[in-house]
């Protein structure tokens, strides 16, 4: 009898893949045994389990190692994010709080960032995420801070005024917001669509050409929309109910994506902050988030900002919110380049503080190129 792999090139290639997989799993376990030792050092010390500065360095290193390779860079990143998730489980299982219900884009961002080996808790409100991180009921919390189309998320900014002395900003991630039309039926059966008003607005052109006559029904969240569509289908399979939401919502509630990426502008991104009671270490490229209120005299905001300009510190972001103390009194939120533990940055922040009635450093974290 002839060797079947000689006659069947597909079987030959699959055998090669099997050989490589054996080696890969062995190597992953070799790595894991080192991680277990790292975990032992961290146990009983104050060194955080999740180390964003180290993850940034690992991600950069593997991206460089993969240059010239044939495997997609984003797939390497995704594999390594899951690798870190496995490491957490080996060192100390982590609980991650997010703004639910399950299947929202916040849930999607949390699970993509922290992977399959963490526990996730739906904390129902942005302030609930702050509260549970501050109390130590979850290790880390994820809150949206801004959307590239909708702008700043006021509830998150306002929560910092209450919680700034009980937690820190520990990291950031960006999630591309891609909407799917989810249904249990066929594309031609869709008669009504549930979703958030913002989702309808962001898919307006697509809906106008594909489903001009479908009824649009607002829902509490994109996840609630998916749940509603499935409930209606169970009562009446002819209802023609569909929802606009994340692919994760489809998976969770048992709907399939009839169409993907139906948003009119493909570059719709939401930035999320990771909250923690711990402080990060310095990485190669950090950002520091600062909250301040200015003194009541003309030009006081310019005085603060010019401290950073004079010291050639780049400002990457600015927002303002009513201070909640006096009418027409504002709290400003800025992000500067550099880490609070860097002496030069600490000195400049001290100089800026002299021009403010209040200044709080909310946290330093690796400047996130991480797009999930
Ligand atoms: O280096 C560490 O501190 C580890 O815990 C190991 C490791 C890794 O798997 O590489 C895991 C989690 C951390 O967030 C960073 C890195």
Image: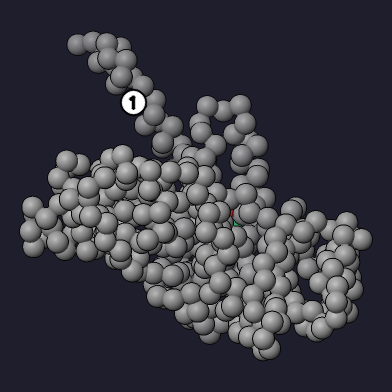
Establish if 90 lies above or below 82: below
Q: Residue at x 52, y 27 (%)?
A: 70
SS at circle 1: helix
Quadrant in the picture for residue 345 = bottom right
Quadrant in the picture for residue 62 = top right
In percent of width and height, residue 159 lies at 57, 79
In this view, the residue farthest toward the right is 310
Q: Residue at x 34, y 26 (%)?
A: 15
Identify which residue, 185 or 106, lies in the foreground.
Answer: 185
Q: Quadrant of ligand 1?
A: bottom right
In this rendering, position of residue 301 left or right of residue 248 = right
Q: Residue at x 41, y 46 (%)?
A: 263
Establish if 127 lies above or below 202: below
Q: Identify the residue under disc 1.
A: 14
In percent of width and height, residue 20 lies at 44, 32
Kindly tell me whether residue 139 is visible in this rendering: no
Q: Is mark 1 within 8 Å of ligand 1?
A: no
Q: Residue at x 65, y 37 (%)?
A: 64
In percent of width and height, residue 271 lies at 56, 58
Identify which residue, 56 or 10, lies in the foreground.
Answer: 56
């Amino acid at each position: 009898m002839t060797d079947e792999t000689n006659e069947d090139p597909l079987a030959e290639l699959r055998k090669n893949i099997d050989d490589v997989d054996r080696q890969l799993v062995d190597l992953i376990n070799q790595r894991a045994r080192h991680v277990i030792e790292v975990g032992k050092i961290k146990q009983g010390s104050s060194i955080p389990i999740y180390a964003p500065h180290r993850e940034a360095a690992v991600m950069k290193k593997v991206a460089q190692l993969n240059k010239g390779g044939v495997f997609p860079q984003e797939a390497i990143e995704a594999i390594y994010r899951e690798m870190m998730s496995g490491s957490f489980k080996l060192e100390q299982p982590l609980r991650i709080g997010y703004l639910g219900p399950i299947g929202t884009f916040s849930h999607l961002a949390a699970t993509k960032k922290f992977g399959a080996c963490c526990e996730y808790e739906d904390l129902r409100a942005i302030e609930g995420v702050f509260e549970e991180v501050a109390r130590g009921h979850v290790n880390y919390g994820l809150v949206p801070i801004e959307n590239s189309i909708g702008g700043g998320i006021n509830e998150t900014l306002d929560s910092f005024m209450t919680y700034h002395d009980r937690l820190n900003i520990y990291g950031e991630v960006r999630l591309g917001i891609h909407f799917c039309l989810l249904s249990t039926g066929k594309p031609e059966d869709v008669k009504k669509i549930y979703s958030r008003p913002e989702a309808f607005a962001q898919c307006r052109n697509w809906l106008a050409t594909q489903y001009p006559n479908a009824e649009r029904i607002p829902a509490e969240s994109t996840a609630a929309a998916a749940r509603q569509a499935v409930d209606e289908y169970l009562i009446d399979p002819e209802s023609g109910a569909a929802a606009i939401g994340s692919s994760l919502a489809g998976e969770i509630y048992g709907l399939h994506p009839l169409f993907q990426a139906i948003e009119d502008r493909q570059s719709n991104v939401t930035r999320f902050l990771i909250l923690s009671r711990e402080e990060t270490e310095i990485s190669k490229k950090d950002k520091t988030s600062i909250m301040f209120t200015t003194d009541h005299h003309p030009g006081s905001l310019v005085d603060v900002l010019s401290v950073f300009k004079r010291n050639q510190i780049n400002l990457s972001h600015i927002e303002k919110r009513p201070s909640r103390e006096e009418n027409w009194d504002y709290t400003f939120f800025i992000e500067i380049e550099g880490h609070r533990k860097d002496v030069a940055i600490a000195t400049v922040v001290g100089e800026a503080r002299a021009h403010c009635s209040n200044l709080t450093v909310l946290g330093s974290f690796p400047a996130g190129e991480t797009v999930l």
